[in-house]
Image (tube, coloured by chain):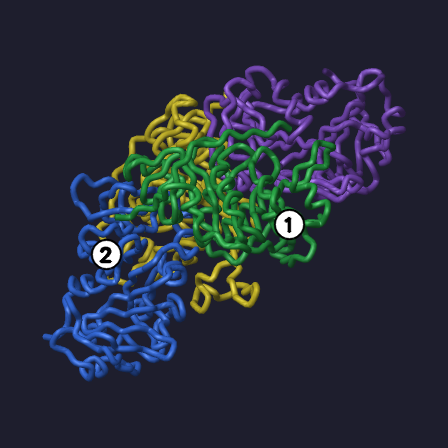
Chain colours: A purple, B green, C blue, D yellow
């Protein structure tokens, strides 16, 4: 079966991160990125609940006041800080978060993101997703290329309610890395064992092929 | 002598009437006023409009659904898209028994801050081009559109801090800050649950997270351990 | 010579303050109020530069980071707190300051205040005055009843640029205590050695006499 | 390793160009970046638009008038109505040599915060019915009028804190906070003058007043004593 595991998707996303960046990791798959940060690089993880500079998730000695936005217990790194939600979202909405890694239900060819509401379940919650999608300098969506029923998640237009229009910069899936450009979607990397035609067949939107198209370096 | 301490959560809630609008601080397990929530359940107040970041996510707010105390809730996270076991709130919402206003989290806290700071509203790009803009004014400023979001205030704010003094000064602990400082500014009556009450001056003036002016009642309680497992 | 000294005006203003109140004292005459606070009562003085709960002005050991809004060194009382200017003005503008005591150049019969700009000098600065005038729950103006040239300061309309319209609740001068009511100005107290006619003669606006008009209790 | 420390104020100002817009933290003597102001004077940068609460009140900003470095100033307190000896700024303003935009202090800090927080503007009642409303939009919300005040940002913010670490985390001291935390969020390049540089972790995470994300350059300096006498 072709395609990356969730952990390898997270690993590939982590390759986008550099020393000094402020990064917010959404609930679910994006949270895994914290396990694959480049060793030795000081990358500052931001949590909506008011932490900058948290470290690994740790199940030891659960402290209810030291959690990430998904409610998981985290550790602190030297140089961390705490602040309230008004300050946390001023940071997010004011363009001070370099990268937000968000999960996705659908991404459109112009970079619209839908990731908060599933009409077929009649449910969903916004949390910090709309603020991160609008406010982060760069939005990376990490998701499986297709839904469980094999419906493509990368579409001409999103069918699901939007989180924010035209906000996504990069899509990393189990099959591909795709940049959202003003002129459309650009396929830049394919997963091992997969080619561009395989990816396009599972993508509703039209993909342009990067002249430098290559296999993911994992 | 200013003394805002109350003997018990139940005493501190003595005038919370049916139909009250109540803010609850807390983010999942962090800084959540669990003792005040349990006292509100004991009190049996009905027709409540609740305002909190989340309900049914490791907080105890879901207990207010056991006897249908909630008429409406304003939250950022209340209904899950996943197939997880539903909270009582989710069940009642699905049956149309409780109303829900879902708000982006940054807009949520900024609306509360605006109410506390005397501002007329919040001009934000968050929510533009989404369901969150429905029914709201859009104001164009220098060529860019912004949603006008209105201030959000309450009759009561139930908040949680780590330490307090009798004058109502509060010190928070780690991510226990979250919505508590903003909510303390935006309600007619602010009731703070704390783990310790100390003498005025024992909280370093540099470390006061909420100045006493904002707090009406302080009640010391042992914290109730809560946690959310995904 | 009839009329209270600056210190006695401050004393009379201090009589308006009660335990638990949050009070902002403007630069100049209002600052003197801090010397006449009711003994033993816990009154919280707020300074725009980010202090709640400061105490007496003290010239000993000047600390540049511990000053009131007039730049004067102050002491701290137990239960004091520091915060930044955004929090300080959220406190002022959000209606959390019970009383602002402000100096005045002119007050109109409907409670308009002019206290920041002197056209004849071509100068003036706003500082926190407009925010305090708009935001405090109760605004007390402490000033001399007439200007140095004996021109009345309490007028039908202000000639000077306004600080805020219809914001003043109480006027305390060297000659009188006057309430601003929806129906106009109400003279409630006169200074020792002064009667209502003496006050009216030095007031451009019309004063109604309180049925309980009395001499100030100092 | 993140290291934002610079050897001297002059090094930290190496790219401040003529015509720059610069915010200066500080309230009279409290939290004023005097060493950075003196370095700016030495540098001789001209055509500056300055943004600060006050000029000529115990701060050192008036030295920038000695060689007419200022083209414009945005302040809440700059011109006195009293007969006190005039500052250089007051003299140059009276002669029309420098422009001045006078802003109510609460509006001033809220405009800076709005710029830092990505908001489209500030809706306030402060200034309604006064000269401060001239040329501004008035927006009616639920029957009440509000002035629309626009975000205020700068190319550089010169700020002052008590302690910093190499990652740019800042801790303030007493009333030295004032405008510094807000200004740190609202400029392209933020330069902090501090009295001590410590190792990351030595500033308690609960006591960080400005998280390092906002600060680009840190320079340790002995404080310059300043004071205003009425």
Q: Residue at x 60, y 45 (%)?
A: B67
- Image location (x, y in percent) of residue B145: 65, 54
Q: Give the position of the C terminus of chain B as an image quadrant.
A: top right
Circles 2 and 1 on the same subunit: no
Q: CA distance from mark 2 to mark 1?
A: 47 Å
Q: Chain of mark 2?
A: C
Q: Is residue A77 visible?
A: yes
Q: Quadrant of residue A136?
A: top right
Q: Is residue C82 above or below residue D102?
A: above
- Image location (x, y in percent) of residue C124: 33, 62
Image side of residue C149 versus residue C104, left or right: left
Image side of residue A201 versus residue D146, left or right: right
- Image location (x, y in percent) of residue D147: 51, 62
In the structure shown, which secondary structural element does the residue marked by tag 1 occupy?
Answer: strand
CA neighbours of label 2 inside 10 A, class few (<14), some (14 to 19), many (20+): many
Q: Nearer the viewer, residue B80 or C87?
A: B80
Q: Chain of mark 1?
A: B
Residue under label 2: C31
In the structure shown, which secondary structural element does the residue marked by tag 2 occupy?
Answer: helix
Number of callouts: 2
Q: Nearer the viewer, residue A143 or D101?
A: A143
CA neighbours of label 1 inside 10 A, class few (<14), some (14 to 19), many (20+): few
- Image location (x, y in percent) of residue D55: 34, 51
- Checking the image for residue D155, the label placed there is none
Image side of residue A43 versus residue D23, left or right: right
Question: Which of the two marks, 2 or 1, is nearer to us in this view?
Answer: 1
- Checking the image for residue B101, the label placed there is 1
Q: Residue at x 56, y 29 (%)?
A: B227
Q: Is residue B115 visible?
A: no
Q: Quadrant of residue C25?
A: bottom left
Q: Residue at x 23, y 49 (%)?
A: C72
Q: Nearer the viewer, residue A162 or B27?
A: B27
């Amino acid at each position: 079966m072709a395609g990356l595991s969730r952990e390898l998707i997270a690993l590939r996303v982590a390759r986008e991160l550099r020393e000094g960046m402020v990064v917010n990791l959404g609930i679910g798959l994006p949270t895994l990125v914290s396990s694959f940060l480049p060793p030795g690089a000081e990358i500052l993880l931001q949590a909506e609940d008011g932490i900058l500079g948290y470290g690994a998730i740790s199940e030891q000695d659960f402290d209810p006041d030291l959690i990430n936005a998904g409610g998981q217990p985290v550790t602190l790194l030297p140089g961390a800080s705490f602040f309230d939600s008004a300050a946390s979202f001023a940071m997010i909405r004011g363009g001070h978060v370099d990268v937000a890694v968000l999960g996705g239900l659908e991404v459109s060819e112009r970079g619209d993101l839908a990731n908060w509401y599933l009409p077929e379940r009649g449910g969903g919650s916004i949390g910090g997703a709309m603020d991160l999608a609008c406010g982060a300098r760069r939005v990376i969506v990490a998701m499986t290329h297709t839904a469980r029923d094999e419906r493509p998640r990368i579409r001409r237009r999103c069918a699901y309610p939007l989180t924010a229009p035209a906000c996504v910069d990069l899509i990393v899936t189990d099959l591909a890395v795709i940049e959202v450009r003003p002129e459309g979607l650009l396929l830049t990397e394919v997963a091992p064992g997969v080619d561009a035609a395989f990816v396009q067949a599972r993508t509703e939107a039209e993909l342009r092929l990067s002249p430098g198209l290559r296999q993911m370096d994992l | 002598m200013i003394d805002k301490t109350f003997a018990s959560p139940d005493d501190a809630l003595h005038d919370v009437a049916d139909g009250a609008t109540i803010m609850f601080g807390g983010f999942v397990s962090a800084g959540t006023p669990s003792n005040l929530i349990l006292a509100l359940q004991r009190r049996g107040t009905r027709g409540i409009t609740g305002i909190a970041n989340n309900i049914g996510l490791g907080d105890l707010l879901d207990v207010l659904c056991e006897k249908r105390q909630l008429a409406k809730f304003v939250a950022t996270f209340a209904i899950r898209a996943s197939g997880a076991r539903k909270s009582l709130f989710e069940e009642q919402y699905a049956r149309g028994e409780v109303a829900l206003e879902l708000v982006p989290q940054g807009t949520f806290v900024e609306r509360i801050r605006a109410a506390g700071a005397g501002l007329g509203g919040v001009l934000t790009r968050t929510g533009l081009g989404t369901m969150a803009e429905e029914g709201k004014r859009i104001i164009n400023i220098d060529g860019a559109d912004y949603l006008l979001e209105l201030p959000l205030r309450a009759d009561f704010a139930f908040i949680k801090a780590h330490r307090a003094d009798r004058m109502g000064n509060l010190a928070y602990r780690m991510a226990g800050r979250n919505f508590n400082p903003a909510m303390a500014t935006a309600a007619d009556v602010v009731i703070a649950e704390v783990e310790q009450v100390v003498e005025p001056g024992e909280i370093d003036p540099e470390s006061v997270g909420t100045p006493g002016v904002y707090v009406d009642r302080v009640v010391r309680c042992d914290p109730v351990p809560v946690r959310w497992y995904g």
